Structures are given as structure tokens and as C-alpha cells.
Image (tube, rainbow, N blue to C red):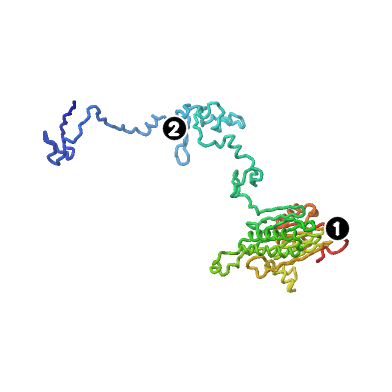
Amino acid sequence: MSQSHQQPALSKCPGCEEPPAAGDLFCGVCGYDLAAVPPRPDDRPTMAITVPPAAPAAEAARAVGWPAAEETDSSDVPAPVVRPTDVPGTDSGGRPLTGPDRPGAASPPGPVRAGGPESAAAQVRHDHRADPGGAEAAGDFPLAAPDPRAPEHTASLGAAPAPGAKVCVACRSGRVDPDGYCENCGHAQPRERDHMEQELDAVAAVSDRGLRHHRNEDSFAVSSTALPDGSAAVVAIVCDGVSSASRPDEASAAAASAANESLLESLPRGTHPQTAMHEAIVAASEAVNALAQEPAGAREHDAHRHQNAPACTLVGAIMAGGLLIVGWVGDSRVYWVPEDRTRPTARLTEDDSWAAQMVAAGLMNEAEAYADERAHAITGWLGADAYELEPHTAAFKPDRPGLVVVCTDGLWNYAESAEEMAAAVPADAREQPLRAARMLVGHALDGGGHDNVTVALLPFAVRPQGAGSACDTV
């Protein structure tokens, strides 16, 4: 059976607050529907919300019981004297926060004992525990990711790099990522070409960035092959990028690689070493020229596109059939240093440079020409903007054992004459060519290292044939 509740009488209209007449269903002033007012529930009395008046600050402080500041700083602000042990409570594991055993509690004053297990436990909090209860029993939340302090994680970071992988030069243990940074310490690694070494049975070469250049623009290639009669032929190519040209490091690398490949192809076929050297220089020139090639239509937008084309110099030596063949374009050099240092030494190349032209024309002596600021301006190089390619080749037949030094001007600037170069070459260079090459690079670095330094050493072994000059032109 449905029940209806009697509508309570209103003392005033909810819309205009005017008192309605007895029995009115609508307000006579504003027309408000007096029957729409919901009845007051008898079982849910309205509760008054009251805010107690705030207590004075001093009285509140006494109620809380904060300890008074013992001293003030220079700004008259009380020093913080409230410590974690002053506030009661529990941690996430239900343990009391007060007392010396709580995590993070201040140690009582007294002498600190270094190295003992008690002092270490008081200063370091370990998340990894060995108790059977694990993290849950100790009140710690389990980690979503592996704890980096866990033994297995630490062991994986300190794992030795795989065989053949690069090792950081700084920490000596971290692996090097493809971007050239150590995965362990983050140290940027030297670029591969900053220092290069290679040694074969009869030749060794070393190249270094030097102390002033931001990159190594030199390059080299050393190799050996067999002639048709079965005898060995040893090759050394050294290239020096022209710094004023674009991409000189690419030019030297392309030239050295192309010349070496050409020789390894032509010498086994029986091509005369001097002819093979000429062809190798031409192949190197074509490789450098290819670096300057641009898509069709680019030339019409840049009429001077070859003015800064990649460029480099080249010098090479071949030991084959008792002959020493040299070839060059530019100002890199070849020196002959006999094993018997009492015999004369010799420089086997002539620079393609302003100074050499002045000397050849009789306008200056060598000392005056090389003292001029224009001395090292080259007049011959490999590159698309070269005036004319003129490969120089020469054949020599040494009559005594000695050492062939093939180098860039980064070395011979510190040992220019043949006598100075012979003095810089270690006495045991023929027996230890790689060690000697390193020492010659060190000689240039000790002198200032203003340029990239590259040197290749070829020990030349022949049976002594009596007196004579150090080398005879064939």
C-alpha cells in the first residue's frame, strides 16, 4: 500500500522569500511552485559543520611538543633541530621509526670506526639482502627492473669484450659501441686513422695524426706479391692529403688503395716494375678524380667546382728483382740509408714544389728556397684540379744492403737532408722495421708534430759487391 507524506508548511517562498498564504500551491508574488520543494527527510537530520577557532601559535607549538631551537644562524632563522627520531611512527614494514635500529636513524655521537662491518652497516643501506625472507619480508617492494647493484648485473657490465671487439683506451675494459664511445665509461675513442700501423715480413709502416691536426689526412698501403719467376716483390705506397682541398683524408685513402691494387695486379703478370709504378700512379689519379664527380647539371650551378676538389700527393717504392723502383707526384720523399752508415746516403726523389723549382732554375740555392714561406707550395698533385699529371719514376740498383725510407713531409720537415734522415733512423732499423718506424714518428712528434706523420720502411738486402755509390740509376 502506497503512502503519501503530508507536505510541510513553508514559512517563506524559496523563490522570492515572501511568506505564502495558507493553502497556496503557488507563490502569489513570483509564481514559484511551492509543491516542488522536497520534503525534509526525518531519518537524515542536517548536521552543522563548525570549525574550531585557531589556537595561538605559541600554544599550538606547546601542544605539538616541538623542541626549541638551540641556536640561530646569521639570518636569525632558528636552526633545524628536529630529527627523524623525534617523530614517532612506523615504516612500510611496520617497524618503529624511532630508535637506533631504524633505517636512516642518526648514529649516536662517538668515534667513527673505519673499515668495520658495524660502521659500514650504519652508513650504507643495502636493498639486496641474503635473508630467506627476501624483499617482501624485509618490507621492501620488489624491483620491476634488475637491480644494477646486484652481483649478476655487475658481472655483466664488467664482462670481458668478445674476441676481436674494440676495447676502451681509457678504462681498458669497456666495449666500444658503433658510435665510437665506451659502453662502460662513455669515453670517446680515437678514430681509427689517428694512428695506424702495419707490418709484413719485409716492410712496416706507421701513420699518426700528429699534435696539431684535428684528423689524419695521410694514408698508406704496404703489400707483397710474387713475380712470374717466383721471386718476391715488396710494395709501399704513402699518400698525403692536401689540407687546403676538400676531403683530403678520402683522397689519400683512395689513392693509396688504388695504387696498391694496380701493382698487385700488374707485377704478377710480368710488367716491368717501373712501368707498373707509372700505371699505379695513373690509377691513383683516376681514383682521386672520381671523388670530385658530381651529378649531371651540378657544373652549371658551380662553374668553379674543381677549384677545391679532393687532392693528395703520392710516393711509392717497389723492391723487385734486385731493383728499387720509386715513383712520386708531389713533395713526399724516398731516402736511401745504407746499412753501413759510413757510406753516403741519398734522397731519391725531387719535390714538386715551389722551392724545388727555384733551385732547379738556379734562382735560389736550396737553403734560401726552403727558408721562403712559399717553399712547401706544391706544383704537382693528384686531383681533378691538377694542371697536368706528370708521374715521376726512377729505377735504382743498390750495390749494398740498406733501408728505404718512404715518408711524407710530416717526417722529413724534421730531418730534411739525407744525412739528417740517416741520423734519425735507428741503427737496428733493418732488423726491426716496425719499431724503427715508430721511433721515426716519435722523432717528428718530439720536434713539434705540426703535420700528419707517415713513414714506411723497406729493408733492402743484397750481397756486397764492392765499393761504389749507395745507389746507381738504371
In the image, 220 versus 417, the foreground residue is 220
Residue 99 x %, y %: 50, 27
- Quarter of image, res 50: top left
Q: Amino acid at mark 2?
A: Ala
Q: Is residue 372 visible?
A: no
| Figure check: 50 above or below 166 | above
Q: Is residue 207 visible?
A: yes
Residue at the image position 14 percent from the left and 40 percent from the top: 31
Quadrant in which the C terminus is drawn: bottom right
Q: Nearer the viewer, mark 2 or mark 1?
A: 1
Quickly name the residue at label 2: 68
In the image, 211 versus 382, the foreground residue is 382
**Residue 63: mark in rendering:** none
Marks counted in the figure total: 2
Residue 454 x %, y %: 70, 57
Residue 335 x %, y %: 77, 61
- Quarter of image, res 206: bottom right
Q: Amino acid at mark 1?
A: Arg
Give the mark, 2 or 1, whose residue is nearer the N terminus.
2
In the image, 467 versus 355, the foreground residue is 467
In the image, 404 versus 43, the foreground residue is 404
Where disc 2 sits, the SS reads loop
| Figure check: 63 above or below 457 | above
Circle 1: is it few (<14), some (14-19), or many (20+) Cα within 10 Å? few
Circle 2: is it few (<14), some (14-19), or many (20+) Cα within 10 Å? few
Taking the image as shown, residue 36 lies to the left or right of residue 294, namely: left
| Figure check: 75 above or below 207 | above
Quickly name the residue at label 1: 463
